[in-house]
Amino acid sequence: MGNLFKIAIRNLLRYKRRTLLTFSLITIGVVFVLVFISVSGSFKNMMIGQITDSMLGHLQIHRKGYVASIDNLPLNLNLKAGAAARLENILDKEPEIEAYSPRIKFGGMFSNFTETSGIRLTAIYPEKEYSTTPLLPTRVIEGSKDLKRGGILIPELLAKGMKVKTGDMAVIVATNQDGSVNGKQFTVTGILQSVTGPGGRDGYIHMEDAVEILRMNDKEISEFAIRLKDFGKLYKFSEKLEALLSKELNPQEKPVFELHTWEKLSPFFNIARMIDVMTFFIKLMLIAIVLISIMNVMIMAVYERIREIGTLAAIGTLPGKILNMFVIEGFCLGVGGAIVGNIAGIIIVFILNLSKITFDFGQQKGFILQAFIKPSDILVISATVIIVSVIASLQPALKASRMEPITALRHV
Amino acid sequence: MALIIADHIIKDYQTEDVVVHALKDVTFEIEPASFVSFVGPSGSGKTTLLNLVGCLDKPSEGTLMVADTDVARLDRKAGAAFRGRHLGFIFQDFNLIPVLTVYENIEYPLIMVQNIPSAERKERIERVLAAVGMADQKDKYPGQISGGQKQRVAIARALVTNPKLVLADEPTANLDSATAYAVIELMKKMRDDLGTTFIFSTHDTKIVGEAEIIFTLEDGELKGKENKGGRSNG
């Protein structure tokens, strides 16, 4: 086998310019894919991080049917106190969960005594919420991150539009489940930067204030947001929790809860998916580059060495060894291209990170690009390049191995 | 027992429109350790006959036994194995592998064809290198040596596997006459030393005289045989 490698490498060096061109093509392809994957992956991870860590959490549990009507924030589809307690009991036992946060979500009117505007409110226990969505406090661009009873965090756009500052008084008016209207006075304690863009009209109040304003006898929870210790185990844990929740049935023997990962709750998942699709097509392009360039160079190699193949066959080289000889040439090209491409890709990503390139996401500006190449990406790309190189060499190699020595020796 | 028994060999080629009768009912026998030449003008069937004996092609009709094997019955893989075990080839254009050194070219069939252990390989290569007078050139590539030297390397490569039969198609065609004589003399010496049968084709009348048995071919027919002391039955 060592001899086959020696012959293959020397044959590659025999046509230095052609080998270098093919090698460069593969290297450029690998570099391009690696840089694209690391940069787009960095953007995707930042985006997912922003969405999950400052708003959604990794998973959410609602009463069955709630998500279908989520735009209306239906209070009648909140989890009753008993169901919420049972759910908390289940969540407390799961070691994969880092934190969870119960929320009451409702729509209301925000008044600064001269103007009134609609607002979507999320009532939280600040400690639980900040543990579940740790980036939420970082969105407080003005005022205090500490949300106490009687305080309200309002979105930046609402504050600007209604000329409200921290420390100002405001009134929230909301309709409870029975249809009666109630109001409560709040102090604006903080102003929140929007994550999702100009449409953000979400404010935060303390859970006990929501119970009071909605005149709830028992605390009825709209949703539980969950943060996992390991985001990579999202799907596995989601399946596990789904199975646990499916055992919780109402008197009509129907499930009480519904579980959703962040992907089903945010339109940004489509962007994340689009990035994945683009990555897939970039990888396809790499495969095409490797396939065509290796096949081209190997077809040429076989064509140019027909007499040599005839000689090898004449002196008794078995067809299998002739096949291996050419496949190993393609393999060496692939391995070389993959190694150099990976090294160059890592260096380029390192330089990109050193350059501290910034980009914006929604209303948030100045995120620093932190491109990262996962070892698994290097392995997958390298394996793809090498496997495709071998596959691309197979057809020319098969042709060489099946050549009749007499025909090959006659070739001019 | 004859090393080669050709019995009423016919070889036809189908070209686009016509059938070419390359060999017409050729019968002969060659004994081991013979030094044989097939002579004749271009198109007489010399190369075709060598290709058949060398198991590179199959006769259309007739039986061809080489080293007790009916070579017409061998498939591609078995044919390659047979060639690797029993035959050596010397080509008109030397056909050395350009990316391998002289030493590696000679080593090639021992590694890739016969799988000979390293120590024995080294001993055999050094022996044949010394025999063909190329020991001091062993690290050079084919592109760095002369035509005569290339043919010496080709002879060494053909002999290193200890074949029963070496086939040489116009081995001197690309050499000047002094080098051509030297190559033929070397082949003869190898035959004397190792007992290997040599069959070569040529249309060079001066070289022909060096053979011990001369078969004359004309238009695919065996027209004559001259035995100058060799072992064969025509």
Image (tube, coloured by chain):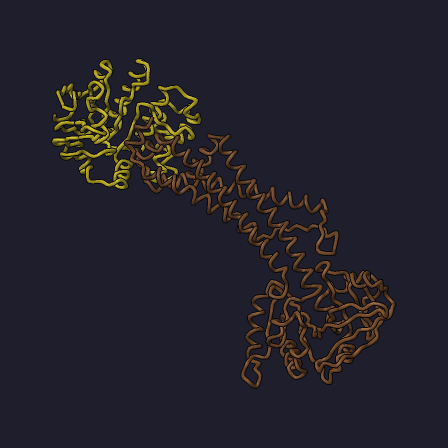
Chain colours: A brown, B yellow
Q: Tell me the residue at 31%/26% (across/down).
A: B155
Compared to residue A91, the image places residue B50 above or below, namely: above
Q: Residue A246, position in %: x, y?
A: 55, 77
Compared to residue B131, the image places residue B80 above or below, namely: below
Q: Quadrant of the N terminus of chain A?
A: top left
Look at the image and tell me whether residue B122 can be seen.
Answer: no
Q: Which of these two is toward me, B211 or A203?
A: A203
Q: How many marks?
A: 0
Compared to residue B127, the image places residue A83 above or below, namely: below
Left or right side of A148 for A197: left
Q: Which of these two is toward me, A44 or A15?
A: A44
Left or right side of A170 for A122: left
Look at the image and tell me whether residue B20 can be seen.
Answer: yes
Q: Quadrant of the C terminus of chain A?
A: top left
Q: Which of these two is toward me, A379 or A40?
A: A40
Q: Residue B80, position in %: x, y?
A: 28, 38
Q: Quadrant of residue B46?
A: top left
Q: Tell me the residue at 19%/19% (across/down).
A: B40
Q: Residue A18, position in %: x, y?
A: 49, 32
Q: Quadrant of residue A102?
A: bottom right
Q: Residue B231, position in %: x, y?
A: 15, 25
Q: Which of these two is toward me, A256 or A77?
A: A77
